[in-house]
Image (cartoon, rainbow, N blue to C red):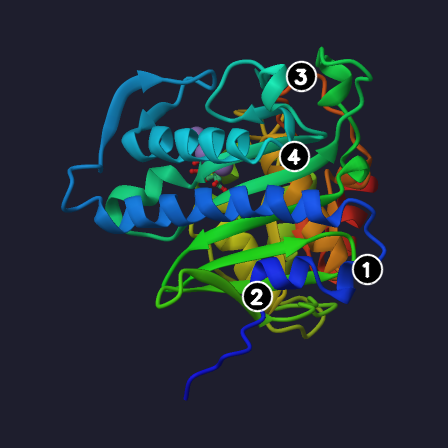
Amino acid sequence: MCDTNLMTLNRWLLSDHHKNTPNRIEFANLMSGIALACKITTNAIKRAGFEQLFGLAGVTNVHSEDVKKLDIIANDAFKYALKGTKEVFCMVSEEEQSIIPVAEHDAGNFVVTFDPLDGSSNIDCNVSVGSIFAIWPKVSKDNNYSDKDVLRKGREMIAAGYALYGSATMLVLTTGCGVFGFTLDYTVGEFVLTHPDIKIKPRGAIYSINEGNSVYWDKATADYVNSIKSGKNGKTPYSSRYIGSMVSDVHRTLLYGGIFMYPADSKSPQGKLRYLYEVAPLSLLMEQAGGKSTNGQQACLDLVPGNIHQRVPVFMGSVDDVSDLESFHKSS
Ligand code: AHG
Ligand code: MN
Ligand code: MN
Ligand code: MN
């Protein structure tokens, strides 16, 4: 059956769902750049075996991580595609030490912070990985960007989303009115709406954390994890699922419920995940889907990063599960 009335990402962005968005044409144009970068990245991943794109690039990044060849390809894809929209004022990437400026004649009114390839330690063994992005309004009045354009509370985001390069390639997005999932239809090369208005259930039965770090956990985290593993007060013990790609673990949590955790611990005193391009965008999606995201003490979206690569602890997922976790941290 040939569907001639596809609700593509671009049509959805220009639909009545956004009739009150003042700059929806410019925003749709910006999103076309992000969608292009995700299509280029998914194609590079699928061709990696044929074109020797697996493995290390032979450099380390600002986080002292061994950068993969596909980290660089995805990073270049995002930088070129975003600049090409002429809608971007400046950018922050996990793979770049400092803020990425855009030449004045190419500059626009949006700030974009992104993780071009998330979970890249999994890429060589063909486990799902993703890209994460957050979109903010520029703050600077002139054409000189400054920290005030990027070191800001997550609640100032106007949109956030991720691409998941899994069995299907999906783009999951919020523009502030719920969470919507689009699946890449290779036959026409478009992201097509397949998951309208995603909502997370109030309680799940899956917990997601790297238990290999349990020797480093603080008491509150250890006591919470033990409470859901032990099945106290007649509850069924939770199942454990941990992929090691934040996008994959968060996407499963969004659709199945439960809790994803990357706590601070004695090995990583700030936690591991970065605020501007991992924790903040995925926290906005989680809240927009009816879930919750906290650093153990307060909502992640109320945090202000001290630098563009600031790490923060994160616990996100079903409201009841995250509230249970918070009760352990607030009483510790
Ligand atoms: P990235 O590949 O962008 O550097 O992010 C990796 C992150 C995140 O995707 C995942 O949740 C976490 O690293 C896994 O860390 P551990 O291997 O320490 O569990
Ligand atoms: Mn990395
Ligand atoms: Mn990441
Ligand atoms: Mn990354």
In the rendered view, tell whether residue 280 sits above or below residue 180. Answer: above
Count of labels shown?
Answer: 4
Give yes or no for contact between labels 1 and 4 (Cβ–Cβ under 8 Å). no
Q: Position of residue 248 (x, y in %)?
A: 48, 54
Q: Residue at x 68, y 52 (%)?
A: 285
> In this view of the protein, which residue sits in the foreground, 149 or 88?
88
Q: How far apart in space, not on screen, are marks 4 and 3 (Cα)?
A: 15 Å
Dot 3: within a 10 Å radius of its alpha carbon, few (fewer than 14), some, or many (20 or more) residues? some
The residue singled out by tag 1 in the image is: 19
* Disc 4 + disc 2, Cβ < 8 Å: no
Mark on residue 117? none
Q: Which badge, 4 or 2, comes first in the chain's sequence?
A: 2
Q: CA distance from mark 4 to mark 2?
A: 22 Å
Amino acid carrying mark 1 in the image:
Lys
Label 2 packing within 10 angstroms: few (<14), some (14-19), many (20+): some
> Quick check: 191 left or right of 145?
left
- Asked which secondary structure carries label 3, the reply is loop
Task: Please name the residue that numbered disc 2 is placed on.
Answer: 238
Work out whether mark 1 precedes mark 4 in sequence or the reverse, and give the earlier one.
1
Cα distance between the residues tagged 2 and 3: 36 Å
Nearer the observer: mark 4 or 2; the answer is 4
- What amino acid type should be assigned to the residue bearing mark 4? Pro
Residue 313: numbered disc: 4
User: How far apart are the alpha carbons under marks 3 and 1?
Assistant: 35 Å
Task: Report helix, strand or loop for mark 4.
Answer: loop
Q: Which mark is residue 307?
A: 3
